[in-house]
Image (spheres, rainbow, N blue to C red):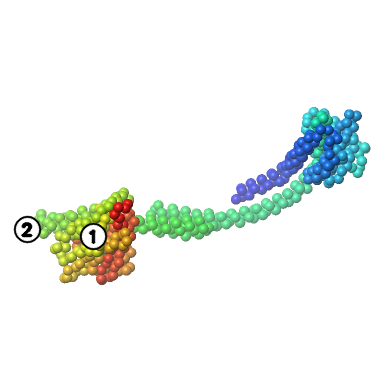
Amino acid sequence: MLLFIVFVIFILWLFQIFLLDSFYREIKLTKIQNLSSKLVMNIEQYDEYDDIPSSIQGDLKDLAIKYESNIYIFIKKENNTYYTISSIVDSTGDTFLPSSNIIQQIWQRAKSSNLNEFMIDASEISTDAIVDPNLPTFHRNSEIIYGQFAKLKDNQEVLIVLNTQLLPVEVATETLEIQLLWIVIILLLFGICLAFMMARFISEPLAKLNVAAKQLPNGKYDANFDATGYLEVDELSSTLNYATKQLKKSESLQRDLVANVSHELRTPLTLISGYSEMIRDIPSENTKENLDIIIAEANRLSDLVNDVLELSKLQSKVLESKFEVFNITNTIDEVLNRFSKFTENHDYVLIHEGTIDDIEVYADESQITQVIYNFVANAINYSKDTSETRSIRIVQTRIDNKLKISVIDEGIGIKKENLENIWNRYYKVYEKQKSKTIGSGLGLAIVKEILEAHNFAYGVNSEYGKGSEFWFILPIKQKNKE
Ligand code: ADP
C-alpha cells in the first residue's frame, strides 16, 4: 500500500510540478501553431491584398480572444513599409496598430531564419523609444512569438505572427505544492485505513483459513473454517467447511466399508472353516446337511464379493448403463422364477399383478433385473416370522407413458427416522435380523446407484410393523415411436 501511495504521489509531483512548465509551454505552442495554420489557409485563398474583405477583422477578433493571443498579419510593400490587415487584434479583442519598428524587426528576423515557420523569443525584440506606451508590446521573457509566411495568389508575401503570453507557472506550482502536501496526508490516512481493512477482512481470515487447511492432509477433518471477512472470504469458509464435511463423511464411509466387508466376510469364512475342520476330524459329521452349509456359506461369500465389486464399479461410473428396449413383464417373471425354489420351501407367495400385459420399457435390462431382484430379496428377508403364508406383491401400474413397479411386502416395516438411511451402504436397521437368504448390506445402495444413473424416480413407503413398498418408475417404449 505504501509503495502504491508513494508511486501515486510521485506521478502527481512529476506531472503537476516538475513537468508543469514544459507541458504548459507545449500545449500553448501547439494551440498557436494550429491557429497559425488555419490563418495561413484562410489568407492564401485571396488573389491580392485588396480582395481581403474587411469582415476578416471580426473573425480575427474572435480568434484572438479564443486563443488568448495577439494576431498580426503583415504585408510588405515595395518601399519597405508594411500594411497590416486593417488593424491588429490583441487577446482582449481590442484593435491597435503596432509600431513599424517592431514590424520591421520581426520581419527581418523571420526572413533571416530562412524558414517558412519560425519562433522568436520576445526578449530579442527591441521595443525602444518609438513604441507608444499605450499600445500593447511584447512581454519580455514570458512570451512566444510564432510566425508563418503565407502567399497570396499574386505572390505577395504575407507574414502571420501570433504572440501569446505565457503566465508564470511559479504561482501555480506553489499552489500545487501545497495541494500535493494535503494529497499526501489524505492518501496516507486513506492508505492506512485501507491497509488495515484489507488486513482485517482479507489477509487475517485467509491466514486463519490457511492454518485450518493445513490440518486436512494430516487427516484432521475436525478443522473448522470459521474465518469471516468479505463475502468471498465467507463463501470460501463455508465451501471449505462443506468440503471437509464431505471428506470426513467419505473417510468414515471408507472405514465402515473396510470394517463391514471384513465383518461380513468373517462370518461365512468362520463357518466354512469350522464345518470343514469338523468334517475332517469327525468322519461321521460328513453329512449332506453340513456340506450344504459349507456350500451355502461359500455362495454367500461369492455373492458378497460380487456385490462389493458391483457397487464399486457403479460408484466409480465404470459401468455405463446400456439402454435397450425390453419386455419388463417377462423380466419380472424371470426374477420371480429365481425365487420359486426358495418360496416353495418356505411359506411365501410371490404375486405379480397390475397391468401385466406385455409392456416394453427403455433401460438397462440387467441393471433393472438387479433392482427388482434386490427389492424382492429384501421383501422376503424382512417379512415377519409368522406361521401364515406371507405374500409379496409385485405390482405394475401404468401412469401415462410411464410404468411404476412396486414391491410390496407385509413385513416388519421401517421406522420413519430410518427411511432416509436405508439407501446407504451397510446401513442396517435391525442389526440382529440376519439375512435368511441373500443380503450383503449393499442391496439398496446398488439399487440407488443404478436408478440414479438411469435418472428414474424411486422411493419407499413404509409403516413400521405393517410392511413396506419399494418402488421405481421407468419410461414405457411407445409403439412406432422413438
Ligand atoms: P441388507 O443386506 O441389510 O438387506 P439392503 O441395502 O438391502 O441391505 O437394505 C438396507 C436395510 O434396509 C436393511 O438392513 C433393512 O433394515 C432395510 N430394509 C430393506 N428392505 C426392507 C423391507 N422390505 N422391509 C423392511 N426393511 C427393509
For the residue pair 451 and 295, the one nearer the viewer reads as 451
- Packing grade of label 1 (10 A; few <14, some 14-19, many >=20) is few
Q: Is mark 2 within 8 Å of ligand 1?
A: no
Name the mark on residue 284.
2
How far separated are the C-alphas under marks 2 and 1?
54 Å
Closer to the eye: label 2 or 1: 1
Q: Is residue 18 placed above or below 188 in the rendered structure?
A: above
Q: Tell me the SS state at disc 1.
A: loop
For the residue pair 131 and 299, the one nearer the viewer reads as 131
Q: Answer whether residue 96 is visible to the viewer in this image.
A: yes
Residue at the front extreme, as displayed: 480
Q: Residue at x 57, y 57 (%)?
A: 197
Q: Is residue 44 placed above or below 428 in the rendered structure?
A: above
Q: Which is nearer the N-term, disc 2 or disc 1?
A: 2
Q: Position of residue 42 (x, y in %)?
A: 78, 37
Name the mark on residue 357.
1
Q: Tell me the SS state at disc 2.
A: helix
Residue at the left extreme, as displayed: 284
Task: Give residue 247's quadrant in the image.
Answer: bottom left
Name the mark on residue 264.
none
* Amino acid tagged 2: Ser
Q: Would residue 463 be found to the left or right of residue 174 on screen?
A: left
Q: Position of residue 91 (x, y in %)?
A: 82, 44
